[in-house]
Amino acid sequence: MLDFNHRPKVHEQISDLIDAALAKDREGQAPRTYLGASRLGVACERALQYEYLRTPVDPGREILGRILRVFEVGHALEDVAIRWLRLAGFDLYTRKANGGQFGFSVAGGRIQGHVDGVINAAPSDLGLQCPSLWECKTMNDKSWRDTVKHGVARSKPVYAAQMAIYQAYMEATVPGISRNPALFTAINKDSQEIWFELVPFDGGLAQRMSDRAVRVISASESGELLPRHATTPTHVECKSCSWQDRCWRAT
């Protein structure tokens, strides 16, 4: 039975206030004016176009405050992981000498990426080759266990693509980073279990992602709409896409 007399409880009221504040804070941030390299592994190139062109999302598909909270918790846990690794003896750099974030900018600034960190040295017993890329993600229990079982390349191909292109483009400023395996770190947000995986550089994957970036930018700037990933709007990728309605109205 519907409760037409429902009055928000204090936890609902405070949560709503926090969500509204997070949404307002996000609106005040400068919009991304480039194609983020971390997104190049997503399934649909048309979705990447919409991102690159800063196309307004469909009504009602704005990022919810709850999701913004998830993002912030992820960033906070990344900071914790950095502290843990440093305490364990890793020489981990997350900022350049001038305080800026490690990253790269190519194609006239139209393709950019920002890395979580670079490991300059690790405890000798591990035998890790350095310098190496460090990439950290937080996951719920189900997603984390799938990553542990199958490995990041199979379970989370978007992350694998991100690391490959980061290694490729960072080689110019951090020589050797593409020769050495990246250290992928996944934190289980439910149990705080940690998964570490060495991911060798995949030059073929990096090249495919670089070609994809050029294709997305070229098509976007020429007014061409790239093909959809799916053939029906009920496909799982389409159902979760912020531009589902717009996309399927397009020719």
Image: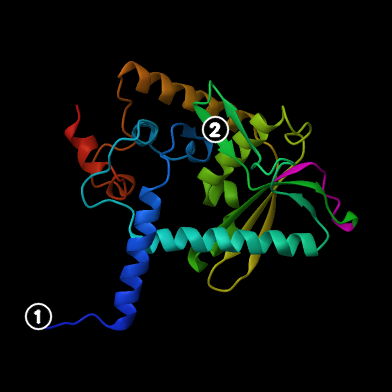
Circle 2: residue type: Gln
Q: Position of residue 119 (x, y in %)?
A: 76, 47
Instruction: Write the residue at 51% across / 23% down.
Output: 211
Residue 4: give its label: 1
Vertical relation: 1 (above or below) 109 = below
How far from the left and from the top, in percent, is residue 3? 12, 82
- Say which amino acid is labelled 1: Phe
Name the one closer to the observer, 220 or 9: 9
Image quadrant holding the C terminus, namely: top left
The alpha-carbon separation of the residues under discs 1 and 2 comes to 50 Å
Query: Closest to the observer: 92 or 216?
Result: 92
Residue in view at x 61 percent, y 71 percent: 192
Task: Determine if the magenta segment contains residue 128.
Answer: yes
Which segment is the magenta one? 125-133
The local crowd at label 2, few if under 14, some if 14 to 19, many if 20 or more residues have their Cα within 10 Å, is some
Please give the residue where the numbered disc 2 appears in the rendered image. Answer: 112
User: Is residue 62 something one can see in this rendering?
Assistant: yes
Residue farthest toward the right in the current orientation of the protein: 124
Q: Quadrant of the N terminus?
A: bottom left
Task: Look at the image and tell me whether residue 146 can be seen.
Answer: no
Left or right for 13, reference 134: left
Which tag, 1 or 2, sits closer to the chain's start? Answer: 1
Query: Are the residues tagged 1 and 2 within 8 Å (C-beta)?
Result: no
Q: Is residue 124 magenta?
A: no
